[in-house]
Amino acid sequence: MMNNHAVETVQLSRKFGNFTAVDTVSIQVRKGEIFGFLGANGAGKTTMIRMLCGLLKPTNGNGTVAGFDIRNQSEEIKRNIGYMSQKFSLYNDLTISENIEFYGGIYGLNRSRIEEKKNKILKDLNLLSRKDAICRDLPPGFKQGLALSTAMLHDPAIVFLDEPTSGVDPASRRFFWDLIQQAAGKGITVFVTTHFMDEAEYCNRISIMSAGKIIALDTPEELKRKYHQNSIQEVFVELVKNNH
Amino acid sequence: MRLGKNQIILSIARKEFLHIIHDPRSLIILFLMPLLQLTMFGYALKMEIQQVKLGIVDYSRSIQSQELIQYFSGSDFFQPVLYEKELTRIDQLFKNRQAQVVLIIPVDFSEQLQRSWYTPVQVIVDAADANAATSIRQYMIQVFNNYNQDHSRAVSLPFEIESTILYNPDKKSTYFFVPGLIALLLVMISALLTSIAITREKETGTMEQILVSPVRPLQIIIGKVIPYIFLAFGIGLVILLTGVFLFKVPFEGSIFLLLLLSTLYIITALSLGLMISAISRTQQVAMMMALIVTLLPTLMLSGFIFPIASMPRLLQYFTYLVPARYYLHIVRGIILKGSTLNNLLLPTMFLFLMSGFLLIIALRKFSLTLEK
């Protein structure tokens, strides 16, 4: 492995026609950290994540994820990452068990491994008694937890979470961040986008994106100190104001 | 590693199968729909025409004209109504649906019969329903021929036509509809269900979730399509069994040949479904497109209801693009005539080329949209 970073990009860009969604972004995400990716809607966060996950080819620039090149090693990258979008991506008409079994199956886990993982997830999320419940009937908070757990079924090195907490009540968000921190505790790198500024405080480091560019990148404490603000929310407002 | 690939396909197929199982209402509709259609076509819809209202205006009022009318009253096909008084507005009879055909016997009918070898009568047919008009005209001619022969008026014929009707001597419409329904429902179910199954995942975002996993597009396609092949087969068999056992449609040919060639047809339909799902974003769009691409052409342009030979030339060329045209040829041949592969080489070849061509295009188009 060439470098020690979980994610590294150099001058990464993506254009859609004349519109530049991601503009020469260079970042380095350390292994095992929770890396927050902040920005308003349309700032380019999702495009960035989609390029890193191999769903979208970059127009310019380079990058590696888990040490693999995002341009020509997407196969290897896909084996080593987990992904969860704001849609939670569970099958609402299937049961909890069936969802877990399916995602285990497409990552090529064998039957006993899937069974073992399934029991662990159900136990951790307190869902053992509801394993045959149809997903549609679960409260959003549980669904979200389940979606995160299934995204990490195959023990990925990195998980990409694209606005995982939108549309969820504060208590569930709190619970969700506990899960994220548990994952990070096990050495999994977490790359998370959000537009909830209070959530940024849970991250080891955050980057703030605006109009396709990274306009700040540091620890939350450092950012607050540097811009003389009390919260990330205020830092964000200050930064975006100066950038326009 | 090989095992792993198969396992991935199996996981997808199993999941797709679960979607079907978890929605029993749709499943019931899928199986009931063909039965309902079959019953409708089999019992309610009769292609053969009976009891045609025949208006007769007899100006001659002679023994000869009475005798001619007797020929019509004696037939099951006609239901004659005599109009005594003079009719000025014949079109009103048609407009009020009091008659579908009108026979006018002129005043000098009996004199002409005796004096000349040429005796005209007038027949006016309502051709609002063109097919019915053709049959009515033929029956009228037949009745006149009978009359002429009995009265030795016809010049003796140099030869006599004796026709034998094969494969469906009673001209039962179920014989006609069972193969057609199999062709229609197989293409509808295969194209519609696969295109919906794929666009649904695009809508809910689960497709994205699958695409960030190491699954390849081909594995997704194969896995998703497998359950629908079985479903289509199941429904095809239900129609066939109902047709054979309930409506006594004879099954003359080889069931294995039918299943084999049906697979080819199903692959063609699935490819259509894949192409549709590649270009549509939502389930509604996919559903509309699948219906437009399968339902109308199969009903209208395959020879299911309207014979291809009687279509305008341009439309006839168009029928070459409809897979059901070839499949219908095959199913009717195998079921009603006991045709073997040797008899069906041409439509089989066409279907084979078509399925191969569509499948390749569909796979490429599908993979492209997923990898965008």
Image (cartoon, coloured by chain):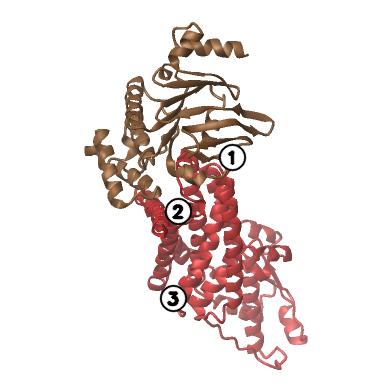
List x then y, in percent, for residue B19. Answer: 38, 49
List x then y, in percent, for residue A150. Answer: 36, 39
Can you identify the residue that label 2 sits on?
B224
Q: Residue at x 54, y 47 (%)?
A: B286
Can you identify the residue that label 3 sits on?
B255
Q: Amino acid at mark 3?
A: Ile
**In the picture, residue B295 is in which quadrant?**
bottom right
Q: Residues within 10 Å of mark 3 (few under 14, many from 20)?
A: few
Q: Please tell me which residue lies in front, B282 or A180.
A: A180
List x then y, in percent, for residue B118. Answer: 77, 83
Can you identify the residue that label 1 sits on?
A57
Q: Please tell me which residue lies in front, B282 or B237.
A: B282
Residue B106 appears left or right of A118: right
Residue A167 appears left or right of B55: left
Q: Amino acid at mark 1?
A: Lys
Question: Considering the numbered disc 3 on the image, is that residue within a helix, a strand or a loop?
Answer: helix
Residue most extreme to the top: A228
Q: Please tell me which residue lies in front, A214 or B260.
A: A214
Q: Amino acid at mark 2?
A: Lys
Using the numbered discs, state the Cα–Cα distance from disc 2 to disc 1 in whole angstroms: 26 Å
Using the numbered discs, state the Cα–Cα distance from disc 2 to disc 3 in whole angstroms: 27 Å
Colour chain B appears in: red
